[in-house]
Image (cartoon, rainbow, N blue to C red):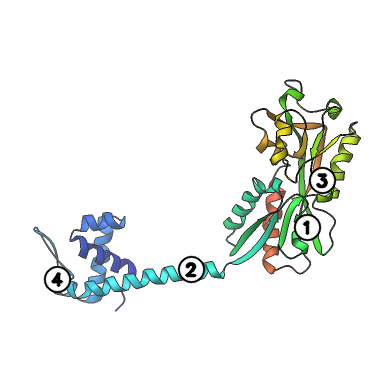
Amino acid sequence: MDATLSQLRAFHAVAEELNFGRAAARLGIAQPTISKEVRRLEQAVGAPLFARSAGGTTLTRAGEVLRPHAAAVLEQAERFGAAARAAAREARRVVRVAASPSIVNRLLPEILRAVDDHDLGVSMEVLEVETGEVLAAVETGRADLGIGHLIGEPGRAVTRDLGRDEIRVLLHRALVPGGVPHVDLRRLANVPLLLWPRERSPIYYDFLLDACRSRGLEPLVLMGTSRISGSWSYFLQDARAFALVPADFAQQEARGVLVSLPLDPALHIPLQAAWSRNPPDDVALILTVLGDLTRDRPVAGTD
């Protein structure tokens, strides 16, 4: 005898409700549909399961005999489904991704969503690291893939440019004339630049200082922690310093008294990925998705 789970669900619901309308509502289907499923099961069984009359619906002898068996089959089917879902979760491969602070809040959610939408059978485990630690996380084996801005010279890892993001000035609104579309750094000659220690990321640190010098500013560097938004951010809030940060991060932090403005001339920083020289196969899948995503993504900070 062939009986489907949908037929057994229909039979079991009607057997409990003793009313086709209520049973249909319980299953979220139309009453003609549940009636059709019951009739098909009765045909497969070779006997009526319900007695229908003006007085209502009752179980026949065959229906009474089969009711507990239908319930047992449905319970087993539910257990099978739960076990299958658990097995699928265990079978999903995990790729560990290291990301710097400027990536975590905007680009990384886009990457996670894109990987999920492509249904690659891969899970991403996110490792949030400080500025300058992305490449080290990959080279030391803590991460399979790293994403960040100007993450450093490759050693035991492979790096690839994914695109460019604009660097913006994050500062108190009192430090710039109202309505200006961009910032001339020479106007900030008396305002310190809040920056992390150079040893955190020499290449990134030097990139920002060279950008200042090429725009006529020899900055007074105020050493903070690895995160501009951390405990030293009160220097920005009190108009005692300014910061140069990627546009995504600047737009996130620009609230209250803080504003985010582009430089004049504009400054862009490479967005890069890094992975080990012998990466897990799934890293290549994520890199493909990442390449598609960043190729279609406008340069951060542009309108």
User: What's the residue type where badge 4 is placed?
Assistant: Thr
Between residue 272 and residue 97, name the one nearer to us. Answer: 97
- Could you tell me which residue is drawn at 32 percent across and 66 percent down? 6
- Could you tell me which residue is drawn at 37 percent across and 71 percent down? 77
Mark 4 vs mark 1, CA separation in Å: 72 Å
- Could you tell me which residue is drawn at 79 percent across and 67 percent down? 277
Compare marks 3 and 1 and give the one earlier in the sequence. Answer: 1
Mark 3 vs mark 1, CA separation in Å: 17 Å
How packed mark 1 is, by other alpha carbons closer than 10 Å (few <14, some 14-19, many 20 or more), is many
Element under label 4? Answer: loop
Circles 4 and 2 in contact, beta carbons < 8 Å: no
Residue furthest toward the top?
A: 178
Compare marks 1 and 2 and give the one earlier in the sequence. Answer: 2
Q: Which residue bears the numbered disc 4?
A: 60
Q: Residue 42, labelled with which disc? A: none
Mark 4 vs mark 2, CA separation in Å: 39 Å
Q: Which residue bears the numbered disc 1?
A: 135
Q: Which residue bears the numbered disc 2?
A: 86
Mark 4 or mark 2, which is nearer to you?
2
How packed mark 2 is, by other alpha carbons closer than 10 Å (few <14, some 14-19, many 20 or more), is few
Element under label 1? Answer: helix
User: What's the residue type where badge 1 is placed?
Assistant: Leu
Mark 4 or mark 1, which is nearer to you?
1
